[in-house]
Image (cartoon, helix red, strand yellow):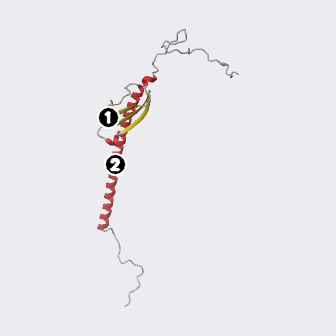
Amino acid sequence: MMIPFQGNRKTSSRQGMTLLEVLIALAIFFMSIMAISNLVDMARERAEEAGQRSIALLVAESKVAEMKAGVTALASGNGNWDTDDRYIWTADVQALGPVLYQVTVTAQRDGFSRSKVELVQYLADPQALGSTMDAIPEETGDGTDTTGTGGAPTTGTTGGSTSGTPSK
């Protein structure tokens, strides 16, 4: 007896996934969820650190601006920030010349070393520069000012043509 030719018929038909394939797929899925969860946690921590560093930089800039404006003395010191006492600052002031100073302000959130920032600026002594609120010296009849420093009067012309064309 001869077996008739049956062609390219599959000997086994596949109707579903095996338990092993389902377990492997679940393991891959849960490992990806855990990895994504860790990435989200790391991103949250970095965002919090960036926020703390941003505030610490604001503290340092505030202290430098106070020294530049003459509100606080141009001297070394440390303390807590007026607005948020969780942030501490330290200022180191070094004289580079008669009126030029190097000001280094370090600020950070207390207990968080990763929020530490350092700002270095070169400032002129605001006391030596004077202020726009200083009184203007008045001139006397002999060409000197009332401050006793002497000098030429500030009024009058300096010579030359006033018609807009250069003099020859």
Which is more toward the observer, 34 or 73? 73
Residue at point 34% right, 53% down?
36
The x, y position of residue 106, in whole percent, is 36, 36
User: Which structural element holds mark 2?
Assistant: helix
Residue at point 33% right, 59% down?
29
Task: Give above or below for 49 relative to 3.
Answer: above
Which is more toward the observer, 130 or 24? 130
Query: Considering the image in quadrants, where does the N terminus appear?
Result: bottom left
The answer to which image quadrant residue 92 occupies is top left
The answer to which image quadrant residue 24 occupies is bottom left
Q: Can you identify the residue that label 1 sits on? A: 88
The mark nearer the N terminus, 2 or 1, is: 2
Which is more toward the observer, 152 or 90? 152
Question: Distance of mark 2 from mark 1, alpha carbons?
Answer: 26 Å
The x, y position of residue 61, in whole percent, is 40, 33
Residue at point 32% right, 35% down?
87
Q: Does residue 97 show up?
A: yes
Task: Give above or below for 57 relative to 15.
Answer: above
Q: Does residue 62 show up?
A: no
The x, y position of residue 151, in whole percent, is 54, 15
The three-letter code of the residue at mark 1 reads Ile
The three-letter code of the residue at mark 2 reads Met
The x, y position of residue 166, in whole percent, is 68, 23
Q: Can you identify the residue that label 2 sits on? A: 42
Which is more toward the observer, 29 or 163? 163
Residue at point 34% right, 48% down?
42
Verify CB contact (< 8 Å) between mark 2 and mark 1.
Answer: no
